[in-house]
């Protein structure tokens, strides 16, 4: 494994305030459109900067199979058809958005787009889902599916419960996964020549949980690989010495009954909660997998290392919001987290056909947004963007996949801009729900 070295350490300046890249891009699009209109030229210039919205599709017949969101509504996805040389290639991308492991948090969640398709809307495809080659060099013309996350247990639960208002709560993540794959098979994925299962955050964990099962749905000669992003959650102690993340997973595993998806070899030795963590999951996965994760993943800094309540007063508020504001003592804690992450990735390092892009940028969900996937300001390792590294690995363009682990923050000069993607619920609320 190569540890990237950068010649000139650089302290990041001009960090952008928290905000969603799509929201940042929208005014730019308006400006470009206006410019084009006034100059009398076609709006071709603006075309690339603004992805179109992709309609929501409800899964047909899902309710008869009990494959439903927390509130009993049908699950959903967005599909954009591939074209040209990509028409028999498929990307299935699993949405993230934390978990719910208590009756209270699941009751709240079912009133949101993360628990009910009643609240879901069309969405823009960006990053690895973009249909333009300059922003997405290798996958732009593939069939692309964005699967909405409405079960709260990384597409893995199978149980029922009762909400606080006395109505039913459906924990049917596993049935949703199966119903969605079935439906996509009927829409042409059954004749795919190659496919990639991807996802970010809780969807990155879903990708690990379902990777081998996805592989098993295709004939052996079809090329199947997996790309979990921002999903390598650590079973680490928080600032108060508690294991907050483990308590969240404990709740999810018990309440939603996820044991059916967990690897049998792990369950023979360990408890189901331990087997829900990526460090254990990757030991059992036999499908080629490329792990994208930041060493200083801000979601994990905010929820695994320094969850609200794990530190006195507001001593950590500014550091957890912006890594550039951490004291050297606080950086020692974050470097400790990095060290543990690298240690737990050793199992992946040893696997042939696997890849690693472990950068030191204060990021989360880097494949899903054009700004971090493939743009002039994207993070790079070995001078490659994530899109280039993943493309090389998927298509076998280079001998041996990239397995790069970045040096310590702030060594990487390409970590210019970090975004806090509020839409992915950057932090759990006080009650440990989101
Ligand atoms: C949990 O799932 C197992 C199968 O994996 C099943 O036998 C059991 O009945 C389920 N428990 C509940 C409470 O639904
Ligand atoms: C970081 O610190 C600077 C001053 O050193 C301050 O202006 C800024 O608001 C801080 N940012 C956050 C997110 O706390
Ligand atoms: C890095 O890659 C870019 C193109 O992606 C290229 O223009 C540049 O020369 C490369 N830099 C080095 C140092 O290899």
Image (cartoon, grey):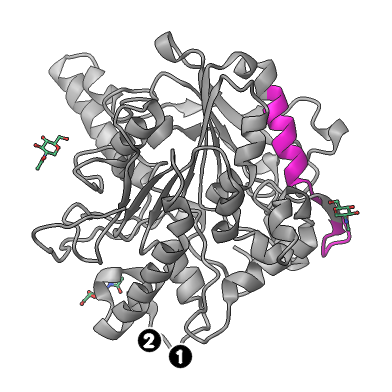
Decide if ligand 2 comes within 8 Å of the CB at mark 1: no
Q: Is residue 100 left or right of residue 280?
A: right
Q: Is residue 296 left or right of residue 171?
A: left
- Given residues 368 and 336, the one toward you in this image is 336
Report if residue 269 is visible in the image.
yes
**Residue found 17% across the figure and 14% down from its top:** 41
Rendered location of residue 87, percent (x, y): 48, 12
Q: Quadrant of the rendered structure where residue 413 is? A: bottom left
Identify the element where label 2 is drawn.
Answer: loop
State whether residue 130 appears in this view: no
What label does residue 312 carry, if any?
A: 1
* Quadrant of the frame with the C terminus: bottom right
- For label 1, the SS is loop
* Residue at the spot 56% in from the left edge and 43% down from the top edge: 95
Give, as a single range, the part of the protein colored magenta. 161-183
Q: Mark 2 and mark 1: span between their CA atoms?
A: 6 Å
Q: Residue at x 63, y 66 (%)?
A: 433
Closer to us: 129 or 392: 392
Residue 162, magenta (yes or no): yes
Residue 163 lies in the magenta stretch: yes
Q: Is residue 129 above or below residue 422?
A: above
The residue lying furthest to the top in this view is 84
Q: Is residue 312 above or below residue 426?
A: below
- The residue at 61%/49% (across/down) is 284
Labels 2 & 1 near each other (Cβ < 8 A): yes
Where in the figure is residue 5, as x and y percent of width and height? 17, 57
| Disc number for residue 315 | 2
Badge 1 crowding class, 10 Å Cα cut-off, few under 14, some 14 to 19, many 20 or more, is: few
């Amino acid at each position: 494994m190569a540890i990237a070295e950068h010649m000139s350490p650089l302290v990041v300046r001009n960090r952008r305030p928290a905000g969603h890249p799509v929201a940042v891009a929208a005014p730019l699009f308006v400006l470009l459109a206006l410019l084009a209109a006034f100059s009398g030229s076609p709006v071709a210039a603006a075309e690339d900067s603004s992805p179109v919205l992709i309609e929501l599709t409800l899964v047909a017949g899902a309710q008869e199979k009990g494959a439903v969101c927390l509130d009993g509504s049908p699950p959903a996805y967005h599909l954009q058809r591939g074209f040209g040389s990509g028409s028999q290639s498929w990307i299935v991308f699993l949405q993230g958005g934390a978990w719910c492991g208590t009756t209270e948090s699941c009751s709240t969640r079912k009133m949101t787009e993360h628990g009910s398709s009643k609240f879901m809307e069309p969405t823009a495809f960006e990053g690895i889902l973009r249909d333009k080659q300059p922003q997405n060099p290798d996958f732009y013309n593939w069939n692309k599916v964005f699967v909405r996350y409405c079960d709260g247990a990384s597409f893995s639960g199978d149980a029922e419960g009762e909400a606080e208002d006395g109505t039913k709560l459906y924990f049917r993540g596993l049935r949703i996964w199966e119903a969605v794959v079935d439906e996509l098979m009927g829409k042409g994925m059954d004749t795919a020549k190659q496919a990639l299962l991807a996802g970010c955050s809780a969807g990155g964990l879903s990708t690990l949980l379902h990777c081998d099962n996805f592989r098993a749905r295709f004939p052996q000669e079809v090329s199947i690989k997996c790309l979990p992003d921002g999903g390598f959650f650590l079973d680490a102690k928080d600032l108060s010495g508690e294991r907050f993340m483990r308590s969240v997973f404990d709740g999810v595993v018990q309440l939603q009954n996820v044991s059916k998806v967990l690897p049998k070899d792990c369950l023979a030795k360990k408890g189901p909660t331990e087997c829900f963590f990526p460090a254990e999951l990757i030991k059992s996965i036999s499908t080629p997998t490329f792990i994208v994760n930041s060493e200083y993943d801000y979601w994990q800094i905010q929820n695994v290392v320094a969850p609200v309540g794990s530190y006195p007063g507001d001593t950590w508020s500014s550091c957890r919001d912006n890594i550039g504001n951490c004291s050297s003592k606080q950086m020692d804690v974050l470097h400790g987290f990095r060290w543990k992450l690298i240690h737990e990735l050793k199992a992946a390092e040893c696997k042939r056909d696997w890849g690693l892009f472990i950068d030191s940028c204060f990021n989360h969900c880097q494949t899903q947004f054009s700004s971090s996937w493939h743009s002039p300001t994207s993070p790079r390792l070995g001078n490659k963007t994530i899109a280039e590294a993943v493309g090389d690995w998927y298509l076998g363009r280079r001998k041996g996949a990239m397995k790069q682990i970045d040096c310590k923050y702030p060594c990487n000069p390409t970590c210019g801009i970090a975004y806090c993607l509020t839409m992915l619920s950057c932090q759990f609320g006080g009650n440990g729900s989101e």
